[in-house]
Image: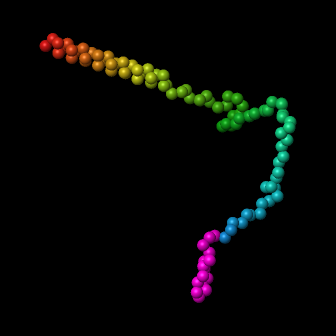
Amino acid sequence: MTVSVPEVAVEEVHPPDAEQEVAFEDDQVMVVVSLIKTDVEPALMSTEAGGMTGAGSLPPPPPPPPQLEIRKIIISDALNLLNNLYIMINLYNFIVHNY
């Protein structure tokens, strides 16, 4: 509680309470669905994309990235590196032991 002498008008710190706008009766519809019975007839489905409908209307997805080819290249490069290292070690040993 704030007391001021002499009494002075105090501004409100908080905004006024929010008020809900009145909704039309059309917006307040209650739908009750019975979960006892299930529809066993097949449902008709249609997909629309770019003016086409039905199955096959979309183009196929792009192929996956070539991870297998990339893996082959990496393994090949690693084997070449090991082969070059083996040749250099043998050349070093040849030079050290023969000269």
60, above or below 84, in the image? below
Q: Quadrant of the N terminus?
A: bottom right
In depth, the one of 50 and 66 nearer the eye is 66
- Residue appearing at x 60%, y 73% in the figure: 13
In the rendered structure, the answer to whether residue 15 lies left or right of residue 71 reads right
Give the tally of numbered discs.
0
38, above or below 91, in the image? below
95 magenta-colored: no
Q: Position of residue 56 (x, y in %)?
A: 67, 28
Tell me which segment is drawn in magenta.
1-15
In depth, the one of 9 and 83 nearer the eye is 9
8 magenta-colored: yes
Q: Quadrant of residue 85?
A: top left
- Residue appearing at x 27%, y 15% in the figure: 87
- Taking the view exactly as shown, the residue that stands out farthest to the top is 98
Q: Position of residue 82 (x, y in %)?
A: 33, 19
20, above or below 11, in the image? above
In the rendered structure, the answer to whether residue 47 lies left or right of residue 87 reads right
- Taking the view exactly as shown, the residue that stands out farthest to the bottom is 6
Q: Position of residue 38 (x, y in %)?
A: 84, 34
In the rendered structure, the answer to whether residue 78 lies left or right of residue 39 reads left
- Residue appearing at x 62%, y 75% in the figure: 12
In the rendered structure, the answer to whether residue 17 lies left or right of residue 72 reads right
Q: Quadrant of the C terminus?
A: top left
In depth, the one of 21 and 86 nearer the eye is 86
